[in-house]
Image: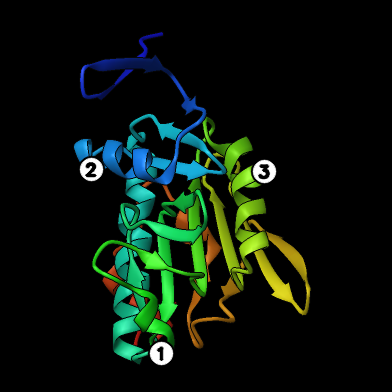
Amino acid sequence: MALVEIRFGHQVIESPKLVRIEGVSEALYDALTALEEDVKAELLDGVMVVHSPEKTRHEDVFGFLFPLMRIFAIRTKQAKVLGSMATVHLGECRKVKPDIAAVRLERAHIITEDAIEGVPDLVLEIVSESTRRYDFGEKRKVYEEAGVPEIWLVDFERKVVMVVRRVGRRYRSEAKSRGILRSQVMKGFWLRVEWLWQKELPDPTECLQVILGKGQA
């Protein structure tokens, strides 16, 4: 199997999955990611996690979900929805890049030119085979410790969406492979889970009309 080549300056890192670099400060992380803006890298408690380029199915699912959620948020004037290269600064040495992050408009002041400086109201991760343990494990833990109200983990390979919601001081999870999944953060936003498993994903503009009550499900 061919390995993925990732470069930071003159350094070459080869890996088919995730690369971990320990002992990285926020300043070093910022400097490295400024040099390689097209590489997705995150910082968790001094460990920089560098992602391999995503497979086409991942990008296909993102290309469906992102405009669906972003345009819904604009139409309903509820939230600002940002994509996978937006940095979320959750605390000292904790900088992550969820595939999709939503911040309600009344909290939009936490969005700066460089990052979301604080806790989003919703984060969504598109899980692949190479990131499943990371997304469901340490990254979910970081989101919960930060107090993110709603976390969506879309596992297209296993055809299940795990939604984790904060209820009081605890989190409760719900796994769905079919049926309607509703957001508690973006009021009125829902998703027919089966849309995600279609070989050819549906037109997000048509799905949006259905969600808004202007089309046929």
Question: Which residue is nearer to you in this view: 36 or 197?
Answer: 36
Q: Amino acid at mark 1?
A: Gly
Is the C terminus in the top left, top right, bottom left or bottom right quadrant?
A: bottom left
The residue singled out by tag 1 in the image is 213
Q: Earlier in the sequence, mark 1 or mark 3?
A: 3
Q: Nearer the viewer, residue 23 or 68?
A: 23
Q: Position of residue 123 (x, y in %)?
A: 50, 63
Rendered position, 171 above or below 34: below
Looking at the picture, tell me which residue is in the foreground, 204 or 49.
49
> Which residue is depicted at the point 33% across and 47% down?
60
Location of residue 177 in the rendering, given as x and y in whole percent from the top left corner: 63, 56
Q: Earlier in the sequence, mark 1 or mark 2?
A: 2
Q: Residue at x 42, y 17 (%)?
A: 15
Q: Residues within 10 Å of mark 2 (few under 14, many from 20)?
A: few
Q: What residue is pinned by disc 2?
A: 34
Residue named by callout 3: 137
Q: Describe the element under mark 2 as helix, strand or loop.
A: helix
Q: Position of residue 46 (x, y in %)?
A: 53, 39
